[in-house]
Image (cartoon, rainbow, N blue to C red):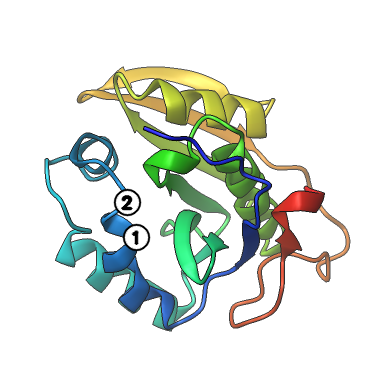
Amino acid sequence: MTTVAASTAVRLRPWRADDIDRLARAAADISPDALALRFGRPGTTIPDWYADRIADAWARGTWNAAVAERGGRIVGWAEYGLDDDPRHADIAALVCDRYRGNGLGTRLVREVASAAGAAAVRVLHAQIRVGNQAARKALYAALPDLRYLGPQDGEWHYVVCLPETSNRTTPGLPHRGGEIADARNG
């Protein structure tokens, strides 16, 4: 497998409504093992239930994401979804195989954590399938105050408290459109 440097024309930006249709193309660049680690079962495509959940939560304003793209293709994304208490959210990420191992996942997690904080989220939760060392490494690199809570049901559980921000206009991911940052600068 050839790894592509994350700074090679990879751009970070907010999720757009049309990205849901672009996930199928991204899945072609993700190994079945990586898809299984992220979605809990082997496969070669993004599960329909996941796409449906994103569409519903996006429409309700309870989900958001940062996208990494290169040449118009999604090469990774990190997301947060609000819990019943909107001060709490779950966070997750997935990076296409050839873009792993160069910090792109870490940058995506940082970006989406910042956006969650700007949206008044105070606590992020993460569940990583046991054995997914890449996701674990990205989380610890992006969120230095991350606390490990222990294993449960085949997953490692983590939590991190986000700092209070007095300025709610802090740049983050807008709900619709807008540029985040160029990965070459981050």
Is residue 167 placed above or below 174 in the rendered structure? Answer: above
* Residue 5 figure quarter: top right
Q: Secondary structure at mark 2?
A: loop
User: Which quadrant of the figure has residue 11?
Assistant: bottom right
Compared to residue 111, the image places residue 151 above or below, namely above
Q: Amino acid at mark 2?
A: Asp
Dot 1 crowding, Cα within 10 Å, few <14, some 14–19, many 20+: some
Residue 135 point in image, percent of width and height:
44, 31
Q: Which mark is residue 153?
A: none
Residue farthest along the front direction in this orientation: 2
The N terminus lies in quadrant? top left
Which one is nearer the viewer's eye here, 116 or 35?
35
Q: Are marks 1 and 2 in contact (CB under 8 Å)?
A: yes
Q: Nearer the viewer, residue 115 or 15?
A: 15
At x 59% / y 42%, what residue is drawn? 104
Identify the amino acid type marked 1.
Ala
To which residue does mark 1 refer? 26
Residue 157: % across, % down = 40, 27
> From mark 1 to mark 2, how far is it between C-alphas?
6 Å
Question: Is residue 181 left or right of 61 when viewed as pictured?
Answer: right
* Disc 1, SS: helix
Coordinates of residue 159 in the picture (x, y in percent): 52, 32
Which residue: 63% across, 49% down? 113
Question: Measured along the vertical axis of the image, is residue 110 above or below residue 86?
Answer: above
Q: Residues within 10 Å of mark 2 (few under 14, many from 20)?
A: some
Residue shown at the point (34%, 60%) measured from the top left: 26
Can you give x and y, in whole percent of width and height, for residue 128 in the image?
Answer: 36, 31
User: For this view, does 83 lie left or right of residue 108?
Assistant: left
- What residue is disc 2 on? 29
Whether residue 78 is situated above or below residue 127 in the rendered picture: below
In which image quadrant can residue 176 be found? bottom right
Q: Residue at x 65, y 44 (%)?
A: 107
